[in-house]
């Protein structure tokens, strides 16, 4: 057996925590020397300690932990609980990383705002094109990324790459809402393709048409996808200066897909249908 300090080092938990669990009756020492009062623990108590720590980590109260330990659940049940908590932590970490990238990009934008004298905006007409796509309302950017990556991997593997153009995202949302993205995502089609291509989770792409636009303002963003708002800001400055107003649904054409994740560079053509503003607009 091990004295409390030794057991603390073995279990990698503080002696203070072990004493606290002893007071609560959650983990009592295997033996207490009646003469010295020294607490002694056994290595056989490590599984119980690990169960307590797992239940504490997933947010259960001490009362709930006591009740669950009394049920003598198998180790596999605790493994499942810890696996679920691990997934939750990973999700939270991913969300915080996304927020950090957004903060960094906004800071960059503060530093560079107004420095671009002549935005590299290209006006062009876009013809109607066949569009193999799926429209969904997605809850967050992670869901958007997952769907785009799935389409990028599944569709070429199913029907081949030769008849497919760029992945394009049509933005149906009337305003930006990070909890509700109404998007249509798919491939511009350059040849004959099936009318329907299945995706995982009972999804499917269907063949339709992407309408033509007589006057499309475009700007190419190069960099992480999460930084594309910088391109939109530049585009907006140019449109306002030239007295244009938005006249339809925006599009994002993925000329280079970010294959290594959201931090890797993408090449995205931002597209906004426009018309000339009325002379008295805003007066």
Image: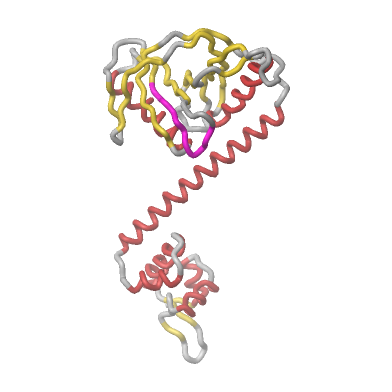
Image colouring = secondary structure
Question: Residue 120 location in percent, x, y?
Answer: 63, 14
- In this view of the protein, which residue sits in the foreground, 62 or 213? 213
Describe residue 123's horizontal placement relative to residue 142 as left or right.
Answer: right
Q: In this picture, is 111 found above or below 162?
A: below
Magenta residue span:
176-186
Please give the name of the residue rendered at 36% of the width and 11% of the height, measured from the top-left corner.
Answer: 190
The residue lying furthest to the bottom in this view is 35
Describe residue 226's horizontal placement relative to residue 278 as left or right.
Answer: left
Question: Residue 188 location in percent, x, y?
Answer: 39, 16
Please give the name of the residue rendered at 45% of the width and 85% of the height, measured from the top-left corner.
Answer: 32
Q: In this picture, is 215 found above or below 138?
A: above
Q: Is residue 193 magenta?
A: no
Question: Residue 102 location in percent, x, y?
Answer: 59, 36
Please give the name of the residue rendered at 53% of the width and 69% of the height, measured from the top-left corner.
Answer: 14
Q: Quadrant of residue 77?
A: bottom left
Q: Quadrant of residue 28?
A: bottom left
Please give the count of numbered marks on the rendered protein.
Answer: 0
Image quarter in which the N terminus is found:
bottom left
- In this view of the protein, which residue sits in the foreground, 27 or 185? 185
Question: Residue 46 location in percent, x, y?
Answer: 40, 69
């Amino acid at each position: 057996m091990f004295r409390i300090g030794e057991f603390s080092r073995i279990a990698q938990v503080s002696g203070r925590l072990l004493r606290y669990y002893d007071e609560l009756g959650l983990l009592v020492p295997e033996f207490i020397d009646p003469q010295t009062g020294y607490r002694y623990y056994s290595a056989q108590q490590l599984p119980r300690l690990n169960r307590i720590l797992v239940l504490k980590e997933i947010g259960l109260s001490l009362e709930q932990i006591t009740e669950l330990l009394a049920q003598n659940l198998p180790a596999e049940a605790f493994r499942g609980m810890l696996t679920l908590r691990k997934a939750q932590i990973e999700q939270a970490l991913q969300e915080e990383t996304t927020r950090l990238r957004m903060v960094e990009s906004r800071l960059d934008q503060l530093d560079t705002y107004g420095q671009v004298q002549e935005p590299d905006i290209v006006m062009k007409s876009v013809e109607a094109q066949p569009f193999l796509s799926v429209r969904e309302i997605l809850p967050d950017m992670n869901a958007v990324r997952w769907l785009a990556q799935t389409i990028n991997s599944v569709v070429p593997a199913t029907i081949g790459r030769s008849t497919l153009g760029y992945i394009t995202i049509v933005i149906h949302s009337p305003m930006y809402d990070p909890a509700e993205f109404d998007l249509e995502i798919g491939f511009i089609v350059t040849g004959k393709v099936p009318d329907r291509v299945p995706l995982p989770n009972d999804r499917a792409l269907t063949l339709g048409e992407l309408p033509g636009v007589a006057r499309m303002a475009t700007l190419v963003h190069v960099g992480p996808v999460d930084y594309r708002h910088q391109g939109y800001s530049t585009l907006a400055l140019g449109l306002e200066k030239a007295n244009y107003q938005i006249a339809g649904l925006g599009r994002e054409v993925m000329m280079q897909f970010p294959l290594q994740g959201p931090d890797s560079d993408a090449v995205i053509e931002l597209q906004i249908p426009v018309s000339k503003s009325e002379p008295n607009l805003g007066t």
